[in-house]
Amino acid sequence: MSHRSAVPQRKTHRLAERALRHAMSFALMGALMIAFIVPAPAQAQAPEAVINLYSARHYQTDEALYENFTRQTGIQIKRIELKDESLLQRLAAEGRNSPADVVLLVDAARLWRAQSEGLFSPVDSARLRQRIPEHLRAPDDAWFGFSTRARVIVYNKASVKPEAVDSYEKLAQPHNKGKVCTRSASHPYMLSLVGSLIERLGLEATESWARGMVANLARPPQGGDTDQIRAVASGECAVALTNSYYWVRLMRSDKPEDQAVVRQVGFLWPNQQSSGAHINISGGAVAKHAPHRAAAVRFLEYLASDEAQRYFADGNNEWPAVESVITDNPALRSLGAFKSENTAISAIGKNQTEAQKLLDRAGYR
């Protein structure tokens, strides 16, 4: 074949290559258009079914509570457990970048502090307002109490007559000098009790009470609530304050040493002839910057269900916040009916700053 006859053939090849490139371009454009037009699978578009829980509750019995919520809803719970102070510090430090959806705390003073620091977001839930009594939630529904516990008095049966210690006020009277044990005055359980006394008695009378308590201490304030009960049993002190569920734990224990403590120590409901026993709560809230807000509200509503309320009572010896719930905890039931104070939990929390100042002035450490 001559050189001249090859020219038309090369031209034909170039035209074919150009046609092939155009075809490939159109195919690519078509694929891209399809990718934009056809929606992604629904599963990829749906929000992640999860909540991030920041909890100051460290009770193994709560595991069943969380597992049942996930089983019912399909929403997974990713949990961080810290002591209250560390938890609140972390939440504040994270600010807008916090992954927290729900916050659980175990005292009115702590809940009020977190609310005042802007760490919670109010919840508009008709179910929660209907289930949780008004005095057990924040006025603006920034947090809700889901279980209650009483601040009770225990005494040594061998050395104390119950009528000598049957009110918070009597613990500060001269006849109990050198007999009283408590935990640190700066602990939230004490701050909440003192906040309740301020609400009921006023600042001056409560400070006088605190000075009487300091004069009556058998030892410097120390330890947890179970330590106070054991100190009463050993005779290190004659009377002490404790949250009710610590006492019930010892009652339900099968350890011989715990049963020995229960035999030596008496239990009573304070102030049954006057204001009633001081009540505190374990409560929850939606975090200010919750990334999964709808799921967080759903979790709080679950905590107000009959089923979850029974977990609190039967698992950790607390009383349900929902008044209609009937529980099956023989040890808790054996304590009998009692009169409780009706002071708003929010007012008790609000008084915590004044409570700390008052205790400091009284020398209560």
Image: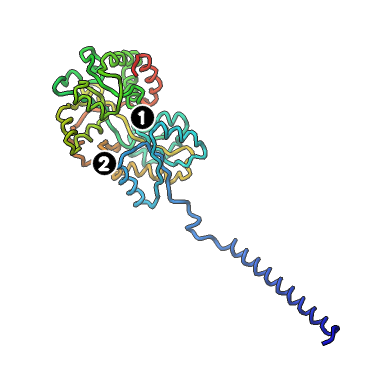
| Callout in the foreground (2, 1) | 2
Mark 2 secondary-structure assignment: helix
Give the x, y percent position of residue 279: 29, 29
Give the x, y percent position of residue 138: 39, 32
Apparent side of residue 300 relative to residue 8 in the rendered image (left or right): left
198 or 133: nearer the viewer:
198
Give the CA separation, mark 2 to mark 1.
21 Å
The quadrant holding residue 35 is bottom right
In the image, what residue type sits under mark 2? Gly
In the image, what residue type sits under mark 1? Ala
327 or 325: nearer the viewer:
327
The residue depicted at 19 percent of the width and 27 percent of the height is 267
* Neighbourhood count class around disc 2 (C-alpha, 10 Å): few under 14, some 14–19, many 20 upward: some
Quadrant into which the C terminus falls: top left
180 or 194: nearer the viewer:
180
If you read the primary sequence from the N terminus, does the residue marked by circle 2 or circle 1 appear first? 1
